[in-house]
Image: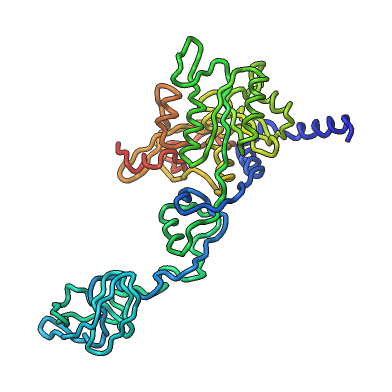
């Protein structure tokens, strides 16, 4: 292939990058260009929070045999028909079974077997009489209560049947689900590998937290928040802080790219003479998907693929950085983890006061939640600083493109950012 043709192909690819698109289109394009990563088989103790890559099919019945739900006596139900305090029934005890024993006993009319919770049922028994309803003696019990057929019995396979699908591909493995997998006879499961994200913060003015802060400098809070969100969702990451130098930025990107599955940069998104990220990635022949989105905050965000790996260029302003990450980058990274439809919880709430956006873009507004007369009330956060507003928000009010305001009293859908807040807070 000649040099002219290579240059022409690169030029066409760059021309395809969309600019200043709607938020809805940006999210659609983002998700369309990422996919779940490779899979791996992990033991039970490493499955928490992972996403299943295949259906889980039970290898055994659970319980493996019919067993007792209570401490008591395995009996034949008909032997106790009509048993009362005034008219007790005496049964001969012919043995004892405990959980884990082999059911090698058999009873006939007038007999019982002492059983503990989880013990297998002896042949011939069809009920278990709880021990509080009888009086034991050396080799017999005096029963003063009935035990209808099936009483206090857990049938074999009643919880899980062999060859039954107990968990489906795409499900997130909670501790309870992992217990279910174990009960189904497996000691491991196939899951999607957790993607590793490289977070690169740029700017001569940015300082690592804990280091001395001189005039005109600020701490790398954007980078710290992004990494904290990644940790919150069980994602691995590396973090690098670089100055406003093309060679330094390029070195950081190429070094991280060899180890990471996705890259998120913070700062340098607008494209001014000191916003260098886009210049660097274009020299590295990235495939630009879009740059600048009709959303506020977060407009300068860019997204593309570098060596077929997702690459997000996030703006440096804290509110814009956070919103672009939460609404565009995080859903894509979670899809790489195997989650098919990641989103923050959405609930309906009554709007306490009118909020205004801009009809030309999607507006995200920090909000606080309260409960009044058992109704959920949402109010725009009016806090003294943007950083405190970011930290204290419970939810986001979203005014979609094409709308200019939501009116006080309306019931609207909001995005929950702090799930516990609206259950716990009172006026």
Identified at 33% across, 80% down, the residue is 104
Residue 316 image-quadrant placement: top right
Relative vertical location of residue 151 with respect to residue 198 in this rendering, above or below: below
Of all residues shown, which one is farthest toward the bottom? Answer: 109
| Horizontal arrangement in the rendering, residue 79 relative to residue 244 (left or right) | left
> Where does the image place residue 169, in percent across and percent down from the top left?
55, 57
Relative vertical location of residue 242 with respect to residue 353 in this rendering, above or below: above
Quick one: 173 or 303, which is closer to the camera? 173
| Horizontal arrangement in the rendering, residue 357 relative to residue 112 (left or right) | right
Identified at 39% across, 70% down, the residue is 63
| Horizontal arrangement in the rendering, residue 306 relative to residue 163 (left or right) | right
Quadrant, the N terminus: top right
Residue 328 image-quadrant placement: top right
**Count of numbered circles in the view:** 0
Task: Give the colouring mode of the picture.
Answer: rainbow
> Where does the image place residue 379, in percent across and percent down from the top left?
40, 34
> Where does the image place residue 92, in percent across and percent down from the top left?
19, 85
Identified at 30% across, 36% down, the residue is 427
> Where does the image place residue 113, in percent across and percent down from the top left?
25, 80
Quick one: 172 or 375, which is closer to the camera? 172
Of all residues shown, which one is farthest toward the top? Answer: 215
Identified at 64% across, 29% down, the residue is 255
Quick one: 138 or 130, which is closer to the camera? 138
Of all residues shown, which one is farthest toward the left? Answer: 86
């Amino acid at each position: 292939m000649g040099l002219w043709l290579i240059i022409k192909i690169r030029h066409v690819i760059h021309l395809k990058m969309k600019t200043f698109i709607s938020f809805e289109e940006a999210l659609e394009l983002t998700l369309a260009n990422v996919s779940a990563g490779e899979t791996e088989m992990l033991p039970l103790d490493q499955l928490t929070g992972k996403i299943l890559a295949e259906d889980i099919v039970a290898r055994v019945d659970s319980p493996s045999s019919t067993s007792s739900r209570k401490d008591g006596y395995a009996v034949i139900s008909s032997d106790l028909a009509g048993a009362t305090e005034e008219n007790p029934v005496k049964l001969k005890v012919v043995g004892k079974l405990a959980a884990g024993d082999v059911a090698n006993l058999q009873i006939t009319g007038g007999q019982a077997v002492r059983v503990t919770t989880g013990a297998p049922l002896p042949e011939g028994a069809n009920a278990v009489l709880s021990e509080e309803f009888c009086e034991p003696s050396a080799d017999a019990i005096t029963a003063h209560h009935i035990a209808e057929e099936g009483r206090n019995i857990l049938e074999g396979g009643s919880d899980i049947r062999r060859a039954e699908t107990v968990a489906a591909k795409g499900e997130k493995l909670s501790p309870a689900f992992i217990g279910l997998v174990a009960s189904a006879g497996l000691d491991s499961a196939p899951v999607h590998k957790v993607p590793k994200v490289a977070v690169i913060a740029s700017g001569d003015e940015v300082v690592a937290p804990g280091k001395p802060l001189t005039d005109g400098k600020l701490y790398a809070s954007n980078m710290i928040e992004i990494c904290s969100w990644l940790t919150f969702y069980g994602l691995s990451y590396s973090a690098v802080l670089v100055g406003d130098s093309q060679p330094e930025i390029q070195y950081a990107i190429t070094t991280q790219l060899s180890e990471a599955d996705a890259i998120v940069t913070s700062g340098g998104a607008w494209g001014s003479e000191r916003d260098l990220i886009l210049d660097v990635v274009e020299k590295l022949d990235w495939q630009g998907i879009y740059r600048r989105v009709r959303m506020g905050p977060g407009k300068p965000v860019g997204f593309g693929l570098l060596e077929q790996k997702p690459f997000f260029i996030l703006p440096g302003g804290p509110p814009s950085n956070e919103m672009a990450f939460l609404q565009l980058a995080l859903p894509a990274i979670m899809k790489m983890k195997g989650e098919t439809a990641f989103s923050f919880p959405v609930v309906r709430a009554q709007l306490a006061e009118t909020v205004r956006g801009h009809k030309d873009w999607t507006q995200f507004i920090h909000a606080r939640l309260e409960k009044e007369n058992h109704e959920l009330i949402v109010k725009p956060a009016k806090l003294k600083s943007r950083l405190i507003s970011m930290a204290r928000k419970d939810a986001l009010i979203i005014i979609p493109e094409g709308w200019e305001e939501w009116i006080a009293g309306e019931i609207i859908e909001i995005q929950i950012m702090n799930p516990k807040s609206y259950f716990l807070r009172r006026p």
